[in-house]
Amino acid sequence: MIKFYIDSKEVTATKGETILDVARRENIYIPTMCYLPKASANASCRMCCIEVKGQDGFVLSCNTPPVEGIEVITNSDSLYHERQNIMKIYNVNHPLQCGVCDKSGECDLQNKTLEFDVGEQNFAVRDQVRKKKKWGIHTYDPALCILCERCTTVCNETVGNEALYIKPGGYKSHIDIKLSNCIQCGECISVCPVGAMASTEFKYTVNAWELDKIPSSCSHCSSACQLNYESKDGRIRRVTNESDFSSLCGAGRFGFDFENKVEAKDPLAFHKAVEAFKNASNVLFSSIITNEEAYLLNELKKKLGFNLVNEEARAYQNFMKSFAKFANTSLYNATIDDLKSSEYILSVGCSIESDNPMVKFGASQAVKYKKAFVCTIAPVEEYAISNVVSLYINNEVGSEEAALSMIADTFIEDKSTQQEFYDSLDFGYLSGESNISEEEIALLKVNYQRKENPLLIIGEDVINHPRANNIAAIAGYLQKSGLFKVMVIPPFTNTLGVSLICDLDEAKAGLSVGYNVSSNFTLSAKGDGDLDMPALNQQEGTFVNIDKSLVVLNAGATYNGYELNDIANALGVKSDNIIDYTSKLGFKDTEFDDLDNYFDNVGNAYRGYKIQATQNQENLKLDEVGELGEFNGSVVYSRNPLRQFSIFTKDCKQLNEKMLLVGSEQFAIASKIKSGDNVKFSVKGVEFIRHFKVDKHMKGTVAYNPTFDMDLKSSNYRYNQVKLEVINE
Amino acid sequence: MKNENFNDRNVSDDYFKVDIADYPTTGWGKFKRVIDRTFKIELLVGLWVVLREMFKFNIHTVKYPEEKMPIGPRYRAVHEMKRLWESDTDRCIGCGLCEKICISNCIRIDTKIDENSRKEVSEYSINLGRCIFCGYCAEVCPELAITHGGEYENASDQREHFTMYQDMLTPLDKMKAGKQLEFEGFGAITPHEDERVKKTPLAY
């Protein structure tokens, strides 16, 4: 603890905090232009200068840690004059186009210009010809750019893509891009203090000050990031976030136009839906659903006796059950914040690049700020994250269990509790079958030394693995050992919530009702089913996200049709609003309206509440490692592009990823196909027709097969051996 | 300033005083006035004036709608969209201030980015059924683009009579002929504006 004074107020700082951090925590105002709390200080604007009593000159508060006993002055005549001069220089040749500028009304430059009373231009310099640039999803206007370097900082540190950089040249300096690195996440747009970086689609459509801000959570993946739907006339125009503290991926920021545009209620279809529920023997649903609706389906199940079917959530539920028995706690213990502060990240059975963007962002931040060691154990090397990953371990497809058991054997010192398991391990066999050498595992162990907050990420591959139970057991055992914090990525938005709330069954014979799943009678939020339902940006509710927090979802767009709650009311499970169920979910009895969704001014998130894990005292023995499966020939891996998750992201106007089977040249040769072919193949009975494209950076004989056009995530293992058939006309 | 300054409407001393007798207050006085008005020839005086003027054909009535009274430049009737004198292009930059300030919510504006990466107005309409012709839109417009014109004839077969952007925009032929009129009402540019403009230094 360092005790010092800001404006003669006594404050204390912890190690690592800067003067600016402390001032913000204590609600003392220091103006800034380039400072971004979530990234490292740029120190390019010099607005945050302060005086220290007894010291000559100004000190930058954004990157200076306080010293015991100093007296900081945040405002004086000379400081005001200094800051005013900085603003005067920022305004030299800045185009006077606030009337049309998108940023007008929320522009830092505009605010500070007014704050420091800059009414005229006193300095002069010959203006340059600066051409506007269009970089796909965003446009860049160098004339408006003040070169605060926020965009390059987030691109390099927060996102970790290193696409944006500064092209130096004195007064001609501007931001440039390496487009092949850009993942079109729009982080640069969100942090730009002026109108230089703007969304191509949004630009010049609505003024910032005309939009209603609706704080909500993203519904595309299990991170459920904080976001604000900004709407005008009941239509969402753009998505913003608390960009000072949190991030959004491209899907969250640009995939907002998935609302169900229903003209009016359809009483006939509604009547049919009620009848369908009465006659249904199964109700199928996907995990892209709120907790409340999942709870409601469960209540309907209790009343009507149908089987509630969600294979993907059931796989996750079973995985966590098995995990809980060995971890002695019902939930995994890592969060995204743990990931960011981790110095050692190990992932098994997951695509860090695309499964969950916040995991990818988190890993990248861990590397930038904590110099983390990142190792991915997966059959494919993801070249796009090669700047993040320190070590790729390529295991054979299907051998994740072997990998985890080898890790357990190498890392755990005290083997007495599971002696039989260790005795049964045959390292030679495991290493041979999984293609992971003992040296690689030893290397993992070497790098583990003196690393803080080690973290193990368990991905979707193993949740749906044929040996998922035993893998979950080893993962749980590793969490209990305390060697790693463990994170089990929920595959869909609310898989975790559904698995905690619903009592899921296998499908039985008879008629089925599908909620966002095509079936005999389909309730669809896409608008293509038998009865329309509100999409997730049109309803209120909650999710349980990857951080095991219950977070709030608010409606951004208007909806005119029936809801699931109307059907439930007709069936006798009555409540006025769907959100009346929030307090009955079984976590905490907080009402929906009492849930928070904001960040305070130092960046502490107040979003819903944390779900408490239940403890148990079971003391079971691990099973022996089973026979490892053989996968030869062409293997496809169900993996979506970075900005695509489900049918809801598929048709978003600004998310234009195509359905491409992407493989290496080696894959093309082995499967006797070439780039540009249309190929047909079937995975566990589901037939796919995809356009094939060779990706020169890829290696190996595994191709990526996107599945975001399917309404259900399969509960099968994500790697599948296929026979490809060329169907060119 | 005090209220008396406003209450004192006596701006000049040389008023022309009209010689009008005091009104009668008593019953007898009122009776006498009725008799006077009925049996004196005052009525015929008025009729004579009408007859005389009729034969002189000196008629002051404006024969609306063939004839119309001239409208003052500050008159606030149906809106007009002006063009720039320099280039004949639209003055409107699509800032949306008129939509925001409109107290009867009758203006709707949609904008988009055009092929030259500039802001372009894609839809603009004024619902004249709601418009109260307060003039705020013309006042707030930073470009003097939306103004009021002299067109006060709003007869329509429906209440919601809309005016679209193209209808309000000064026609090109009128513009080319230099016949665009500037609005002189509230929000218009004031005289001697040039002298008050501060110039950006160009001393490099």
Image (cartoon, coloured by chain):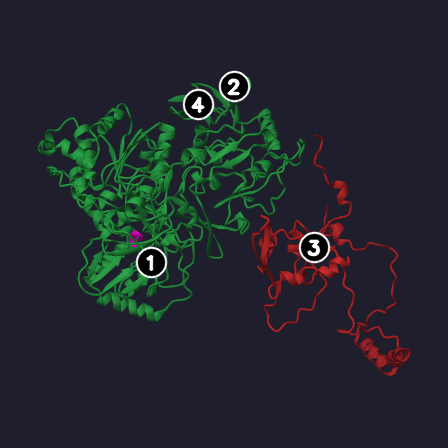
| Residue under numbered circle 2 | A53
A315 lies left or right of B166 = left
Element type where label 2 sits in the image: loop
Q: Amino acid at mark 3?
A: Arg
Q: Which residue is mark 4?
A: A65
Q: Secondary structure at mark 4?
A: loop
Residue A477 vs residue A544: left or right? Answer: left
Q: Residue at x 67, y 63 (%)?
A: B78
As measured in the structure, the alpha-carbon distance from the residue carrying label 4 to the one carrying label 2 is 16 Å
Label 4 CA crowd tier, 10 Å (few <14, some 14–19, many 20+): some
What color was chain B assigned in the picture? red
In the picture, the quarter occupied by the C terminus of chain B is top right
* CA distance for labels 4 and 1: 51 Å
The residue labelled by disc 1 is A577
Q: Amino acid at mark 2?
A: Lys
Q: CA distance from mark 1 to mark 2?
A: 59 Å
N-terminal of the pair, mark 1 or mark 2, is 2
Where does label 3 land, which residue?
A: B83
Lower position in the chain sequence, tag 4 or tag 2: 2
Could you tell me residue A447's position as x and y percent?
27, 25
Residue occupying image coordinates x 72% and y 63%: B150
Q: Secondary structure at mark 1?
A: loop
